[in-house]
Image (spheres, grey):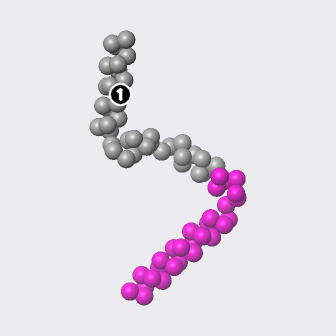
């Protein structure tokens, strides 16, 4: 058990050092690019089923007008 804890502390320390060594601008750019790659909230929360129903419904309402 102690070995696993030591490895975890080492990992956290390495991640913290890597974070501190990157510049603030690089971290900000990484954060904005990660936000841009995220899926829409409807897909992320409920999958593609509701998204496909929404697209189908929008297509149906557009045809009747």
Coordinates of residue 36 in the picture (x, y in percent): 54, 42
Q: Quadrant of the N terminus?
A: bottom left
Viewer-closest of 55 and 2: 55
Q: Is residue 4 above or below residue 55?
A: below
Coordinates of residue 10 in the picture (x, y in percent): 53, 78
Q: Is residue 52 above or below residue 38?
A: above
In the displayed structure image, the side of residue 4 where residue 11 appears, left or right: right
In the displayed structure image, the side of residue 64 where residue 20 appears, left or right: right
Q: Residue at x 35, y 35 (%)?
A: 51
Residue 50: quarter of image: top left
Q: Quadrant of the C terminus?
A: top left
Disc count in the image? 1
- In magenta, the rendered stretch is 1-28
For disc 1, the marked residue is 55
Coordinates of residue 13 in the picture (x, y in percent): 57, 75
Viewer-closest of 59 and 10: 59
In the displayed structure image, the side of residue 39 where residue 61 appears, left or right: left
């Amino acid at each position: 058990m102690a070995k696993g804890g030591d490895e975890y502390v080492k990992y956290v320390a390495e991640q913290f050092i890597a974070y501190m060594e990157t510049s603030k601008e690089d971290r900000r750019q990484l954060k904005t690019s990660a936000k841009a790659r995220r899926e829409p909230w409807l897909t992320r929360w409920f999958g593609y089923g509701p998204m496909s129903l929404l697209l189908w419904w929008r297509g149906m309402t557009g045809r009747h007008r």
